[in-house]
Amino acid sequence: MTLALAVDISLALLVLAVAGWIIAVRDTFGAVIGFVAYGLLLALVWIRLAAPDVALTEAAIGGGLTGALLIGAAARLRGTEAAARAEYPGALTRMLAAILAVTVTAALAIGVLALPDPAPTLAPAATASLAMTGVGNPVTAVLLAFRAMDTLLEAIVVLLALLGVWSLAPDRAWGGCPGPRRLVDPDGVLAYLARLLPPIGIIVGLYIFWIGADLPGGKFQGATILAAMWLLVIWAGLADTPPISRTWLRILLVIGPLVFIAIGFAGAITAGAVLAYPEGYAKPLIVAIEIALMPTLVLTLALLVAGAPQRMPLQ
Amino acid sequence: MNTPTLFGLCAVALVGVGLYGLIVNPQPLRKILAFNLIGSGVFLLFGAIARRGATVGMGGDPVPQALLITGIVVAFSATALAVALVQRLFDEAGSVTLAPDAPARAPVEPPDA
């Protein structure tokens, strides 16, 4: 057995063990902490699968942002834990669930072992057309040129999810600020970190965003880091979430998809197909879309974590 | 056994673990966690398939990798919406039980036998 395979096997077992912990542990807060660790372990798995772009996304969104969202929810819902334990299903349901889970796993495992060899791949096609887009990172080329439709729909889906979250606001708080008001010691460690980290985080976030054209990185990963910095400042009480009725906020939330759609439909005239780029202009148009999507993604991701509006702003 | 097959099998085991947790655990937040486990299992299987599509100069098929990034972001936004729904349920009802016969704020009278 080679060393690399030993590392892979240990990593796979560790991921499965943490997944088991997330399901089995009694305390929801513990399960959420397990989920953050799980996200970071999965990022290592993505590296082992030669997918550094996915690894960055998993660490930033799967572990970081989802973790922050769930830690907040677990803390607020802590009082419901005891009542829920009484609802735990009986041995028969648990056994049937286990049989179902094992059956599904076995069926999928047979599928994994029967995957065709050689594997079908679009990598040569992506390599062949990469030069036409002007970007050096094939994943970015897929996201914004070859499969731009997916990315456009995704930007809209994320925005729809935010509208869904906002629509859960009680009537009295509609148009108000998401999340509770933070009262934190202004000289505490959190406030200190919220002053120290954002300058570094903003540089790192913008760098990851910019480098995404040619190396692993991109707008989603960069936007997540910027969103995390904003949330840190909010949670430390140094700034407040903006009321959702603000015009500037709403303009920034839709500007990314609107620019994307405008450039996409312009392609129907200039390049003969929707979301096609005229020859020689692919790179600047891709960069324009990414820059327009950036504020939209930062705001949407952060406000998804902040949750539904709960209160009106102080006058 | 090579790396993609190993992580492919790890992925399908994650789907199984998540499915069990989704059915068995009564708390909505734990169901959201379990659902995310299933989702990450599906993503990981897709990633293993992407790795199998590696060619000269490329560690994996970039098309599934790009779709995975899209998928992770969409899974996050769906999770945020689900958490907001649970939070609203808690604010309205004072509990987060999904049991169909559970009492809301005040216990209801049992029906006549």
Image: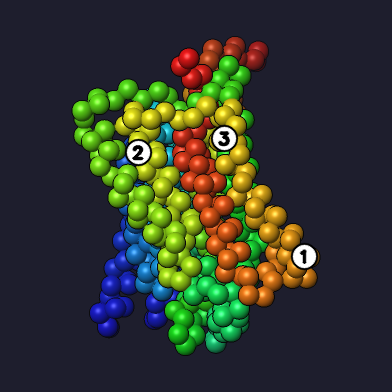
Chain letter belonging to callout 2:
A
Residue A222 x %, y %: 43, 55
The mark tally for this picture is 3
Residue A275 x %, y %: 70, 64
Residue B58 x %, y %: 46, 81
Q: Given the image, on which type of amino acid does mark 1 rest?
A: Ala
Q: Residue at x 57, y 59 (%)?
A: A288
Q: Nearer the viewer, residue A262 or A68?
A: A262
Where, quadrant-wise, is the N terminus of chain B in this rendering?
Answer: bottom left
Where, quadrant-wise, is the C terminus of chain B in this rendering?
Answer: top right
For residue A294, which numbered disc appears in the image? none
For residue A268, which numbered disc appears in the image? 1
Query: Dot 2 surroundings within 10 Å: few (below 14), some, or many (20 or more)?
Result: many
Q: Which residue is mark 2?
A: A232
Q: Earlier in the sequence, mark 3 or mark 2?
A: 2
Query: Dot 1 surroundings within 10 Å: few (below 14), some, or many (20 or more)?
Result: some
Which structural element holds mark 2? helix
Q: Which residue is mark 3?
A: A248
**Quadrant of residue A47 in the image?**
bottom left
Q: Is residue A214 above or below residue A91?
A: below
Nearest-to-viewer mark from 3 and 2: 3
Q: Given the image, on which type of amino acid does mark 3 rest?
A: Trp
Q: Given the image, on which type of amino acid does mark 2 rest?
A: Leu
Which structural element holds mark 3? helix
Q: Do the residues under discs 1 and 3 have CB atoms within 8 angstroms?
A: no
Which structural element holds mark 1? helix
